[in-house]
Image (spheres, rainbow, N blue to C red):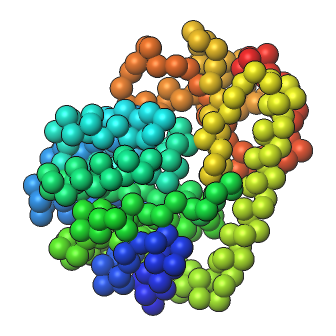
Amino acid sequence: MLREVLAGYLRRVRAADADPGRMIISTGFAQGVNLVLRALSRERGVSRVAFEDPGYGSAQADETVRAAVAMGLRAGYVPVDEEGLVVSALAASGAQAVVVTPAHQSPTGVVLSAARRHALVDWAQRGGGYVIEDDYDSEFRYDKEPVGALQGLAPDQVFLMGTASKALAPAVRLGWVQAPAPLAGAVAEEKQMSDRGSCTMDQHALATLLTSGRYDRHLRRMRAVYAGRRAALVEAFARHAPGVRLTGLAAGFHAVAPLPAGADEAAVIAAARERRVGLYGIGAYRGMADAAAPPALVIGFGNVGERAIDPAIAAVADLVS
């Protein structure tokens, strides 16, 4: 039931080429990407996979990259700029598959431009490569209409992956993979060998939320909540650190705040925590160490009450300005 409901939802909301016969339900994103990589390795001989940089981070820091390395794949990193993934660098990397976040790049927040989308599809179709689209945060967009899924442009080369954990709660361990037709069976086999299926009760609950309209109503309510927190963050920076230009705010639950040139991310984070404010550096998301990379902070607002945001930014304004 859930596969049919999700396929209809993804066609309606994400402009995806969705078919329940090509849908595999997973236990969250981490399992889903592992199933896809194993199927690609077994069925297509994929041995090299690329990740965005900054993105999930190094093999030592992130379970997604670490799992790819553990299954014998070579992990590489492709830079991201203001238009998203640099496809020319991907083509030069020798990777046969790439994991991307085109709707709201993690962590920079940029949207993959139209030109880059078409270049990425062309890379996959001409060279027989595969794109694994992590469609996280796509439902939480504030200033513009949601960007359609990349998978709709090339359903035979793109695996569309999503999860209910951000829309509902992290404890809801349900995700999905919309696979290309020739590989859907292979991904389903990997799922069967992995755990023989995800919780049926949870699947029925999610299907009911979707068909009853409650899921859409929940999203509308939560968009308003997160938009209020987002606005509070912008106002707090305008009041206490007006020289800092926040980016990555079009969607999702975090913003990126550039630090002054030469600033020490680790030192800023440590000083902020002494003031009881938790901050994170963008360096933790880099797969390749780059001393020349500009320092920046990744500032989450998803689980912070509006009233707590202004005093928190006031407390660290001198550190980030």
Q: Nearer the viewer, residue 205 or 228?
A: 228
Q: Residue 317: which quarter of the image? A: top right
Q: Is residue 108 left or right of residue 181?
A: right
Q: Is residue 244 left or right of residue 149?
A: right
How many numbered markers are drawn?
A: 0
Residue 125: x, y in percent? 19, 58
Residue 290: x, y in percent? 40, 18
Q: Is residue 256 left or right of residue 33?
A: right
* Res 241 seen here: yes
Q: Determine the residue positioned at 64% across, 57% down.
A: 144
Q: Nearer the viewer, residue 221 or 92?
A: 92
Q: Determine the residue positioned at 49% across, 54% down.
A: 103
Residue 68: x, y in percent? 27, 47
281 vs 47: above or below? above
The quadrant of the picture occupied by the C terminus is top right
Q: Is residue 228 left or right of residue 303?
A: right
Q: Determine the residue positioned at 15% across, 54% down.
A: 126
Q: Residue 255: which quarter of the image? A: top right
Q: Determine the residue positioned at 86% across, 41% down.
A: 308
Q: Nearer the viewer, residue 291 or 241?
A: 241
Residue 229: x, y in percent? 79, 49
Q: Residue furthest top?
A: 262
The quadrant of the picture occupied by the N terminus is bottom left
173 vs 265: above or below? below
206 vs 277: above or below? below
* Res 61 seen here: no
